[in-house]
Structure formats: structure tokens, C-alpha cells
Image (cartoon, rainbow, N blue to C red):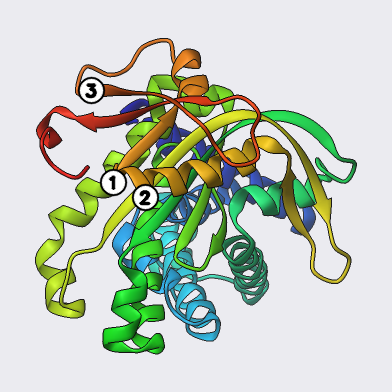
Amino acid sequence: MLTLRAGFWILAPVAGALAGLVYGLAFDIEPLVSAMRGAFIGAPVLLYERGVLLRRWRDLIRRAATPVFGLATLATYIGMIVLGNAVAGTILHRGFGYMANAQVAMRMSETGFAYALGISALATFVLRVRDLMGPRVFASLLVGRYHRAITEERIFLFLDVAGSTRFAEEHGDLAAQVWLGAIFAALAAPVRRSQGSIDDYIGDMALVSWSMDRGLRNAACLDCVFDFLRLVEADAERWTARFGQVPTFRAAIHCGPVVTAEIGLERRKIAYFGDTLNTTSRLEGLAKELGAGIVVSGDLLDRLAELPPHMIVSDLGLRPLRGRKEPLRIAAVRTRERVGSGL
């Protein structure tokens, strides 16, 4: 993770400088000037969008309604543009003798500001659409990866919020929706860190998936669940103060082949078809029957090269599942600190 972030700090100024050079070529501006301004304007914006700069502020406004998100993001971009241009102008004046004084060097042309603002507005719109659709779905639709149905292997996680029906009975449907919204918002960061994708929300359940290589690497698909649990428990006081309880969960994880396709016309989405998805759903129901927190199929365990030392697997044997001819080998997974607990 540290290496990846270090790479962002290098790539972001380079990308900004290249964008500045393109602008300079279009408007006949000295390469040094356009590259310097581009680096100091573009880098903060790129680092911000990668969650390296002002992460808490970015996460806060991403939860806001779309008009608030748009205005807040645009205002953030404008602040970065103005500040970045001022820093670049100061360096150009003091380091390279550009223009007569620092005030003139820091001044941004109307054309330059309009260009930067236009790009920022476009980026704000695209990023909001990406958030609404999900990064993976957005990218896949953009490149047409699943325009024709394909068969691929994926790992699926069904994460079910326990006690949601009781919560709705006690507090009402509106309060239950706010509660579930807060839970699923908290799930986003662990899924992103594990390089997974939240593909759908079905009532009180989230459907998360990974490509096989990403999900199996360092048991990321399993670690995502425990990462989420740690995140919720670390914020237990806030959950109790706001909702009167700390949410609990059940999880089922399975892997196998699915058919993935882009469906719909006026509202497109990426959908999965096949027994693997059905089995994961029934595995989640079995976890509820067994009172197990996290249930994993033997198929997935067989694909994992090695489990992290902090995870413990308890074999639950072969279990019949509705709709399957053959029983499925399953196991419960816990971390060492959770031995004896529900999860």
C-alpha cells in the first residue's frame, strides 16, 4: 500500500504536467510554464480523487446528495486550481525569473481558468456517475467488456445484516433504511482496499465480488469481511449513539464460473447468471440456520494457496443445499481474537 501511494505522488504531477503541455501547445504557451502550472494544478486534483489528499472531506461529500456533491467537489477543485496556480507562479518567478513580479506570475488567465474549470466540471460529472453505477460497472460499460456475454470465474460474498427486520419493526422502515445506508457506506472502504466490487444491494444484503486473482491474493476476499467488522467495532460508540445498537452480520463466500453480461437498454447493468451465484445465496441461508457468522465453501478454500495466520477454519462437513444434486463442503472462518464469539 505504501508503495502504491508513493507511486501516486510521482504519477500525479507527471500526468498534470502532460495535460499542461497539451494546453500550452494549443494556446502557444512556453512549455516550462504550461508544464509547471499543469503539474501543480493537476496533481492535487488527481491525488484527491485517488483518496490520497483530503480523504475525510472527499468521503464526506460523496455521501451527500448529488447537487451538494457536485457543488462541493467543484468548489474543492477551484480551490486546488487557484492554489496550485499560485504556487506554480511563485516558483516560476523566483526560480526562473518568469514575469516581472510574483503577483503577475501567479495571475491566471481567463482562458486558463475556464479550461481548468471546464475539465473539473466534466470530471465531477463523470465521477458522480461512476459512484452511482459502481467503479467496476462503470468501467466495464465504458469499454464494452460485457456487451457480449462471457464466462468467467469470480468470487462472491453475500453479506447480510442480521436483525434488520426487528430493527424496522422497532424503529420504522425509514429509520431502517437510514441504518442500512450507513452500514453499506461503511462497507465501501474495506471492499475498495481488497480490490473488490459492490455489485448490488438486495434488501438488507450486499453482493460483493472479486476476480479470482484479486480475491485469492492474500485471502483478500476473507480479509475484507474481517476488515469491515473491525471498522464497525472500532466505531461502536457512534453506532450505539446514533442507532441504539452496533450492527452484526452473516457472510457467505463461494467461487466458481458464471456468465457475465451487460443487460438492459434504458437502464444498463452488469448481471451474473449461473449456479455459483445461486449456491452463494443458499450458503448464506445455511449460515443463518447454523448460527455461523462467516461461512466459506470448500471450493474457495481449495483455491486459496494459504490462509493468513490470524484466520482459523472450522470444518462444518458436507451439507446439502437446495437445488444442488451434490452436497457442498463448507467451513466457518474466524480470526484468533474471535474464537468463542459469534463471528
**Helix, strand or loop status at disc 1:** loop
The disc at residue 242 is: none
Q: Please, what is the three-letter code of the amino acid marked with disc 2?
A: Lys
Kindly check if marks 2 and 1 are in contact, taking CB atoms under 8 A apart as contact. Answer: yes
How far across and how far down the image is residue 84, in percent? 43, 60
**Helix, strand or loop status at disc 2:** helix
How many numbered discs sit on the rendered protein?
Answer: 3
The quadrant of the rendering that contains the N terminus is top left
How far across and how far down the image is residue 77, in percent? 48, 68
Q: Earlier in the sequence, mark 1 or mark 3?
A: 1
The residue at which mark 1 appears reads as 291
The residue at which mark 2 appears reads as 288
Which residue does the image show at 66% across and 29% down from the upper left?
325
> Which is more foreground, mark 1 or mark 3?
1
Above or below: residue 48 compared with residue 279: below
How far across and how far down the image is residue 161, in percent? 36, 60
The quadrant of the rendering that contains the C terminus is top left
How far across and how far down the image is residue 32, in percent? 57, 43
* Left or right of 292 on screen, residue 255: right
Which residue does the image show at 54% across and 62% down from the upper left?
201
Q: Please, what is the three-letter code of the amino acid marked with disc 1?
A: Gly
